[in-house]
Image (cartoon, rainbow, N blue to C red):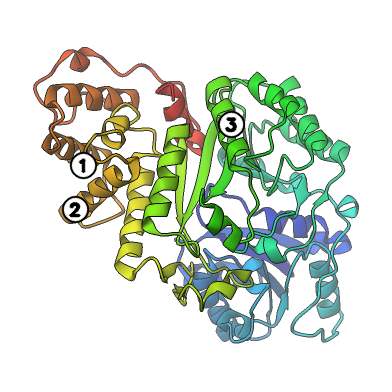
Amino acid sequence: MSEILLATLNARYIHTAFGLRCLHANMEELQPRCSILEFDIKQRPADIAEELLAFKPAIIGLGIYIWNVVPCTEVVRLLKQLDPDVRIVLGGPEVSHETDGQEIVGLADHVIPGEADLAFAGLCRSLLTGTAPPKMVAAAMPDLAALASPYDFYRDEDIAHRVLYVESSRGCPFACEFCLSAVDLPVRAFPVDGFLMEMDKLLARGARQFKFLDRTFNLDLQAGAAILEFFLERWQPGMFLHFEMIPDRFPQDLRGLLAKFPPGALQLEVGIQTFNTEVSNNISRRQNIERLEDNLRFLRQQTGVHVHADLIAGLPGESPESFADGFDRLWQLGPQEIQVGILKRLRGAPITRHDREFAMVYAQHPPYELLCNRDLDFVTLQQLKRFARHWDMLGNSGRFSQTLPILLDNPHHASAFWNFWDFSQRLHARLGKQHGIAPANLGEQLFLHLCEWGVDSAVLGEMLAADHLASGGRGLPAYLPAPGKASDKRAKPRPQESAKNRRQQRHLDSGK
């Protein structure tokens, strides 16, 4: 049994709770009395409470995020009903700002806003010795060089089957108002040599997939280059690295390093958010659009990097037409994935200063998505949310790489966005749902839609058949016309894929 439990609810099993491992690593003399328990949001709160209480803990620390605050609230309520003596300590971004009146905060015993790497251990010492700390426990900003490494707390099962999160720096120098980085602590870096030593240990244990949590990996170009060179020197088949990078900061040396990696080995998440200069100014976002576009062209034309580019719908001052223009501009630059997100009002983010001028109305419950504003009424926002979901299934999945351009570059509209908008509207009218649409059903609706737009059914059938087979399908879906030459093909044997980057592999197989 453990006196201290560190727990959270991950969005999916494949995710790992990096924050819990950071806390556990820095428990010092309390570490033998502490255990990590991870759950996911699909599990019943009663089952989670049962498993936690089975350890007969004195203290339970819970990581609270936007995706798990609702089920975590029920878990905390159950824990306090069943064992009022257990001390519940909360931490995480969802309980670090605007905590007054927050239900889960009211139910818990203590809350540590901010970086709790060291503060949690200090609070536990106080509780275990009978001291009564305040409810809100201030956490001093830790010296990253003095923190114990969390990487030894990845289990062999984590390394084999789950995403491994790593961080070489914390903080962000920018002040984009939709993001908590606008109120966050300054940029600090872990010592590069020590970080690479830890990465070497993970590689020796068999780790091949690394997702960097750094918000601006290419901010410190010297450190970033050292990390990229480290992985290049130790490259093995199956390795995959994910970085979040500033899209307008790719000097020649960095370009040269990125170009050396094998195709599909790197995924870069680049936050564009908007191409509208006025909207960028509204949210205090600085970016050089011309340089950004040049960098994206370089990544797509001269490297094998998988590019995941972000746009946000609903930013103050962004009209449907402006967002559509930005989407079209990004589509022409050719990233493998365009993540269409809906603006969220994160607790503590200064985006709220625009509420009155732009009539911003947000949902009161997580994920706090925008419901409407001055430029986007509720119905349009609902349609944009469906657009985003349908785009993820069709545009980002890699299953329709050959057929997608027929839809987006169709002369029906002189706009990729509005062409897909029409298809999304059709999907909703015909199927009435955003989730659980099988690829075959999606393909059938795409076939019918494009036939109605006058696309030759035989040509379209060949494209859809090729996409189906390239995605690992067998035979041909029933909705396709009489077999052509594509039907004589057989799906090529595919190398064993990791569930952690299956989508990227589809894009790679399609040559995109």
Q: Are marks 2 and 1 in contact (CB under 8 Å)?
A: yes
| Dot 3 amino acid type | Asp
In the rendered view, tell whether residue 218 sits above or below residue 256.
below
> What is the distance, in whole Å, between disc 3 and disc 2 at their CAs?
40 Å
Q: Position of residue 89 (x, y in %)?
A: 70, 75
Q: Tag 3, which secondary structure? A: helix
Between 18 and 76, the residue placed more toward the observer is 18
Nearest-to-viewer mark from 3 and 2? 3
Residue labelled with disc 3: 294
Residue at the image point whose x is 36% and y is 63% from the top: 381
For disc 2, the neighbor class at 10 Å (few under 14, some 14 to 19, many from 20) is: few
Nearest-to-viewer mark from 1 and 3? 3
Location of the N terminus (image quadrant): bottom right
In the rendered view, tell whether residue 86 sits above or below residue 254.
below
- The tag earlier along the polypeptide, 1 or 3, is 3
| Dot 2 amino acid type | Leu
For disc 1, the neighbor class at 10 Å (few under 14, some 14 to 19, many from 20) is: some
Q: Which mark is residue 494?
A: none
Between 172 and 133, the residue placed more toward the observer is 172
Residue 461 at least partly seen: yes
Residue labelled with disc 2: 431
Q: Position of residue 506 (x, y in %)?
A: 42, 29
Q: Tag 1, which secondary structure? A: helix
Residue labelled with disc 1: 441
